[in-house]
Amino acid sequence: MKGVLPIALRAKAEDKIGLLVPKDNAAGAAVVKGLQVIPIQNLREAVGFLEGEVKISPTCVDLARLFDQPREDELDFADVKGQESVKRALEIAAAGGHNVLLIGPPGTGKSMLTKRLPTILPPLTLDEALETTKIHSIVGLLAPGQALITQRPFRAPHHTASDAGLLGGNANPTPGEISLAHHGVLFLDELPEFKRSVLETMRQPLEEGRVTISRAAGTMTFPSQFMLVAAMNPTPDGKMPGESRCSPREIQNYLNRISGPLLDRIDIHVEVPAVKFREITAERTGESSAQIRERVVAARTRQQERFKGKRTITCNARMGTKELKAYCALNEATLELLKMAMTDLKLSARAYDRILKVARTIADLAGSEKLTSDHIFEAIQYRSLDRQLWA
């Protein structure tokens, strides 16, 4: 049965005392407190219960136990040799909820690093878990007996995905990949291979955190607050610009598949270089996901305290103009540094805001309330893949 959680929430909102649902879906509905959920195996049993001939105990779910279950991740950042600068960028992204673009030749570990990103993200809150579970319930992606999604989703659609597959749609409006990734990660590998029309339709959801789908059957709005992580080669043949056999025009045409406005909505651009031989053969491992996650959770906790009472702002990446002025004040030194970067790199006004948001996250990871030149300088480095530098 699809959509049992939204049905249960609606029943609770209308002050219903109970709900009869198929046995396999009972746990999913029972996460709604104050609602008696009766598990039914067939219609005869349902009739017997309603007439008082059959006694069936309501299904109960221990939410605390669901969230206390340890993560069963087989992936860990400790498995990745080298790429310390990329790991740092992903830690910042996880701490502030920022969108990321990884650019580098094939075989440098872009996909390997991205697949480990969920292992350092902060845990879902109950409200986030309910929102995420509702979407997956509507599409019918919950396993039989699964009560709640307690880990952030990771969605990785193929580059042949259609507009409807990515944003949602079909005859009856249903959630697409960007909504299934709500409160989680949407990974778009080989970003330039996606249809430009598909990528351009993502601009509004990236900005507003929701997507509206209009069809003959009606108009539906689905939430889509996700972290976009994209990966791409630097040139059509996969080599760095100085090593590629492609002409400058071919390289530029390849990069032009990603529009400037979409690129501006990606906070962090980071190069993923080839791993050096000594790093591959080194016995020393890097930090574990658990160690990195501890710092990420601490930074997110600071942000939750800062944005308390502002329901639409859950992390630094969601800050608006008002919050930027309030929490990203610059002194003369940091303002001059940022002015020089904007002039020399010819960055857009939107890039200016992205730099401030990333700098705020870097400061949170360092436990600093004030933005310093070091925070601004590191944030500027993550705009190094702006189009002007690759032209």
Image: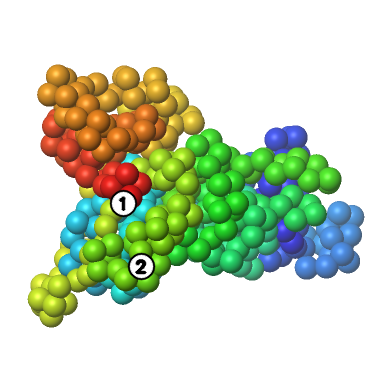
Residue 315 seen in render: no
Q: Secondary structure at mark 2?
A: loop
The x and y percentages for residue 206 are 50, 42
Q: Is residue 302 left or right of residue 254?
A: left
Seen in the picture, residue 91 relative to 23 is either above or below; the reply is: above
- Residue 333 appears in which quarter of the rendering? top left
- Amino acid type for the residue under numbered disc 1: Trp
- Categorize mark 1 by other alpha carbons within 10 Å: few (<14), some (14-19), many (20+): few
216 or 271: nearer the eye? 271
- Categorize mark 2 by other alpha carbons within 10 Å: few (<14), some (14-19), many (20+): some
Q: Is residue 208 left or right of residue 7?
A: left
- Amino acid type for the residue under numbered disc 2: Cys
Please identify the quadrant where the N terminus is shown: bottom right
Q: Residue at x 70, y 35 (%)?
A: 13
Q: Residue 246 has which mark?
A: 2
Q: Residue 390 has which mark?
A: 1
79 or 109: nearer the eye? 109
Q: Residue at x 57, y 58 (%)?
A: 195
Q: Residue at x 35, y 67 (%)?
A: 246
How far apart marks 1 and 2 lie (CA) works out to: 14 Å
The x and y percentages for residue 259 are 47, 46
Seen in the picture, residue 251 relative to 314 is either above or below; the reply is: below
The x and y percentages for residue 249 are 40, 58
Seen in the picture, residue 258 relative to 234 is either above or below; the reply is: above
Q: Are marks 1 and 2 in contact (CB under 8 Å)?
A: no
- Residue 83 appears in which quarter of the rendering? bottom left
Q: Earlier in the sequence, mark 1 or mark 2?
A: 2
Q: Secondary structure at mark 1?
A: helix
Q: Is residue 189 left or right of residue 36?
A: left
